[in-house]
Image: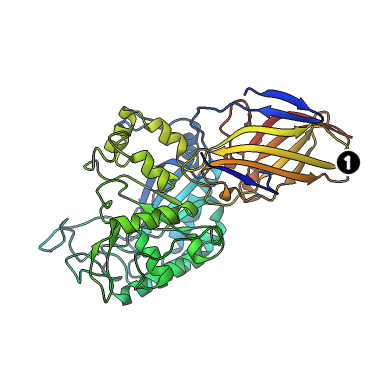
Amino acid sequence: MMKQFITGLIFCCCVYSLSAQNVTVTYKESKEDIINPERGFYIPFGTKASDFKLLDAKKLAELRAAPQQSAKTNYSVNVSLIYRAYELDIFKDKPLSESFLQNLQKDFDAVREAGLKMILRFAYVNTTHGGDCKDEYKICPPYGDAPREIVLMHVKQLKPLFRKNGDVIAVLQQGFIGIWGENYFTDYFGCGSNDGAGVIADSSWLHRNEFLKALLGALPMDRMVQVRTPQIKQRYVYGPRASLMSRSLTTNEAFSKKDIARIGFHNDCFLASEDDYGTFYDYGNSVSKRDTANKRLREYFKADSRYVAVGGETCDDAYSPQNDCAPAGFAEEEMRQMHYSYLNTYYNTDVISDWDSLGCLYTIKRQLGYRFILKKAMLPAIVKNGSLKIQLQIENAGYASMYNKRPVKLVLRNTESGKEIMLNLNINPQLLYSGLYTIQRTLKLPTHIIPGKYKLYLFLPDANVLLQKQPEYSVKLANENLWEETTGYNSLNHSLRIH
């Protein structure tokens, strides 16, 4: 396990040791599958614009309240995420209606009330048809998506809702283009299938880039768009003729407002074939042909995914035993190397049921996304000069870091009055990648603090001020006997006296 030391950073059963005026507290790890925001297995919900079925806040809250299990499976999952897919079937040639936009707002409100977040995608068509075409899967044109000017108009209409409700959007999948919004079988943005030109021409890459630019601009700057393949990101960042060897996102660029830092990935055929049904494939351009690129694009994905949102679903169990648990398969290792934060609960259930029966689903459920374990803390017993020194050792045992920002606060609660003081620790927990960290900081107490005895808590609330009042949106550490359910605080099981 990699050890990392971060200076100037603050980030049960406990064992105490006293050295001078400092107390060392050791914490016990929980083996529980923690329900935490923006990670884990999601429940999918789809609806058509022509037959809009609103989300129900009460039913959504029930998803979070108890483990969820399909009638077709033996496994259950804890849920903090839903996937919401909107099929814009009646808007392929006209603006989105006011009633549709109002219903969309009602959905956002229901998700917020339930204490969940949503993975969001829009598409114009979710069905295929066959015919006399050259495509190997016999998915034939016309495909049924919308023209470029309609797509751009719809993005412009959705922008105010995206900005208003960014707090409950975990991530937006690119969508819109092609069947299922997967940016492949499309009538208007250049289809790379064997039935057409066989490549995506430069002009089509430019049209795709124009659309992705509009989508990034429609979202709040602290939210990411996930694209269906790594080449889509390469061709956006570096142009239509970008090399397969294009450099990945760097640490210095990560979690910034730059476009390169705001584009993640959704793989909708995780370990379904050698190249995940074309996920890791070169679709060419005006001067190059289609070609295999599995190794190169996987390496790019592994490097880039450390800093962005990654998720998706399994789609076929044919790639077995490779998609099974170790030692025969490498599903867990793939999630770890590619930094997966979420997966679909119900697709493909054959694959997930194999993980369950073979014994690795328990680990996957716990390690998708981030998993913060507090190992120990060095804390003062007495504070006399208004300066509070704290040191924490924390491990991220998950496959990924957080992809959305949130504050980290130290809470001091007076044991007599119950009055609380919150100190902002100015930490970005997105930078706590998988590994072990020693975190320390010296904090200045407010001059008005009342002398007395105070209990200490670690608080990782949502970045949105209003959601900070809902404990469902706070991060629970993977430790025993630390969580305070009514507030969303994690107790440090320590009290100090301020003079």
The residue under label 1 is 385
The residue type indicated by label 1 comes to: Asn
Q: Position of residue 429 (x, y in %)?
A: 60, 47
Q: Nearer the viewer, residue 77 or 260?
A: 260
Residue that lies at the very extreme toward the left in this rendered image:
132
Q: Is residue 368 left or right of residue 321?
A: right
Q: How many marks?
A: 1
| Circle 1 SS class | loop
| Scheme of image coloration | rainbow
Q: Quadrant of residue 124?
A: bottom left
Q: Nearer the viewer, residue 77 or 153?
A: 77
Note whether residue 345 is visible.
no
Image: 441 above or below 327: below
Residue lying at 32% horizontally and 34% vertically, measured from the top left: 325
Q: Quadrant of residue 498?
A: top right
Note whether residue 303 is visible.
yes
Residue lying at 53% horizontally and 66% vertically, measured from the top left: 258
Crowd band around label 1 with a 10 angstrom C-alpha radius: few (<14), some (14–19), many (20+): few
Q: Quadrant of residue 138?
A: bottom left
Q: Position of residue 485 (x, y in %)?
A: 62, 31
